[in-house]
Image (tube, rainbow, N blue to C red):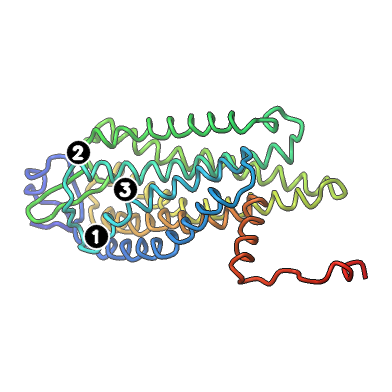
């Protein structure tokens, strides 16, 4: 049986849903190493961020609430990663059963969708405050922001529910794969919804980020003497979010679209398809890095978070406080 080329009839007889699927490659091992790195960097950073949000923030504004929900999305990823690390380092062996396979992939997909959604909301919040300072959106209360965040979670979860209804565990002898992206002979409708969501949730927010960045940059140029510092701070925040967004999510989209192109236009070219599939698995590692990079977004996007972080570091004694006597401050 030729698993690399996937051209034998035995694969199709064992699992009629898969075709042209490589099961052995170094890509999962590389992905496992990336996820371990993400756990080492992202978990401590997220715990510190959670502590600051819960115990050091003096007040919660809508902007702060959206950043907190971005942090919650990161925790969904961190909870799911140990199971993926175990599977990928074993290179194609999933030992946790079909039910947990569905739940695990569902949580990973929700993390991606929620991260993208709240990154976009944070950028739109900056955009309206700078470009349209008198818009009614800028007067949103914390309660209204909470309801809006709840709506975002509802939509994100609803779009990913199909993953829970589909058998995503591929078994062939001793090989057991738990993947939400496979080459199906005929994609079930839940998988089609998953693929369309995967593509749409990148391009729509990405174009929004580009548009907001350009409009805020124009405002920076036009308002040289009016709130210049505030506008500069906003464009830095939007620039950081756009950079993190592009680095984390674009590689998987480009390789995923490349795989779809080969799959539909050159269905018999299994070597090329399996090669780009391996590249796709490697690029998924960049998606997981968003939980390690999101604390940078908190620092650039919220002066309240940044001040709370500096205050916490000062309290721990890592930064010397200004201890000049009061009677010398005016000199």
Q: Can you tell which quarter of the image residue 144 is in?
A: top right
Foreground mark, 3 or 2, reads: 2
User: How many marks on residues?
Assistant: 3
Q: Which badge, 3 or 2, comes first in the chain's sequence?
A: 2
Q: Which badge, 1 or 3, comes first in the chain's sequence?
A: 1
Query: Which residue: 57% across, 40% down?
Result: 65
Q: Can you tell which quarter of the image residue 189 is in?
A: top left
Q: Which residue is mark 3?
A: 262
Q: Which mark is residue 86?
A: 1
Label 2: few (<14), some (14–19) or many (≥20) C-alpha neighbours in 10 Å: some
Q: Quadrant of the C terminus?
A: bottom right
Q: Are marks 1 and 3 in contact (CB under 8 Å)?
A: no
Q: For this rendering, which residue is in front, 71 or 262?
A: 71
Query: Which residue: 33% across, 45% down?
Result: 260
Q: For this rendering, which residue is in front, 314 or 16?
A: 314
Q: Quadrant of the N terminus?
A: bottom left
Q: Which residue is mark 2?
A: 167
Label 1: few (<14), some (14–19) or many (≥20) C-alpha neighbours in 10 Å: some
Helix, strand or loop under label 2: loop
Helix, strand or loop under label 1: helix
Q: Which badge, 2 or 1, comes first in the chain's sequence?
A: 1
Q: For this rendering, which residue is in front, 246 or 328?
A: 328
Q: Are marks 2 and 1 in contact (CB under 8 Å)?
A: no
Image coords of residue 210 (percent x, y):
61, 45
Q: For this rendering, which residue is in front, 152 or 244?
A: 152
Image coords of residue 96 (percent x, y):
18, 50
Image coords of residue 61 (percent x, y):
63, 39
Q: CA distance from mark 1 to mark 3?
A: 30 Å
Foreground mark, 1 or 3, reads: 1
């Amino acid at each position: 049986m030729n698993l690399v080329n996937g051209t034998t009839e035995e694969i199709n007889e064992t699992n009629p849903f898969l075709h042209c699927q490589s099961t052995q490659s170094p890509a999962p091992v590389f992905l496992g190493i990336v996820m371990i790195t993400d756990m080492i960097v992202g978990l401590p950073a997220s715990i510190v961020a959670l502590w600051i949000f819960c115990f050091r923030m003096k007040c919660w504004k809508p902007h702060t609430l959206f950043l907190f929900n971005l942090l919650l999305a990161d925790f969904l990823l961190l909870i799911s990663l140990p199971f993926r690390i175990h599977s990928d380092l074993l290179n194609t062996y999933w030992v946790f059963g079909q039910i947990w396979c569905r739940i695990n992939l569902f949580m990973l997909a929700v993390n991606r969708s929620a991260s993208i959604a709240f990154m976009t909301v944070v950028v739109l919040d900056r955009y309206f405050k700078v470009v349209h300072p008198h818009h009614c959106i800028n007067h949103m209360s914390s309660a209204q922001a909470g309801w809006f965040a709840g709506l975002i979670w509802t939509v994100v979860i609803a779009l990913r529910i199909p993953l829970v209804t589909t058998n995503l565990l591929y078994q062939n002898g001793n090989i057991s794969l738990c993947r939400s992206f496979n080459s199906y002979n005929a994609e079930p409708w839940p998988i089609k919804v998953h693929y369309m969501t995967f593509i749409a949730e990148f391009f729509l927010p990405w174009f929004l980020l580009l548009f907001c960045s350009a409009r805020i940059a124009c405002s920076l140029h036009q308002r040289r003497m009016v709130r210049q510092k505030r506008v500069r701070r906003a464009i830095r925040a939007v620039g950081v979010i756009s950079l993190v967004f592009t680095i984390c999510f674009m590689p998987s989209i480009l390789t995923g679209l490349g795989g779809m192109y080969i799959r539909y236009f050159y269905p018999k070219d299994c070597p090329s398809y399996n090669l780009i599939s391996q590249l796709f698995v490697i690029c998924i590692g960049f998606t997981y890095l968003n939980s390690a990079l999101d604390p940078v977004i908190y620092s650039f996007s919220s002066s309240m978070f940044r001040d709370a972080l500096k205050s916490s570091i000062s309290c721990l004694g890592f930064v010397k406080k200004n201890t000049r006597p009061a009677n010398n401050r005016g000199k």
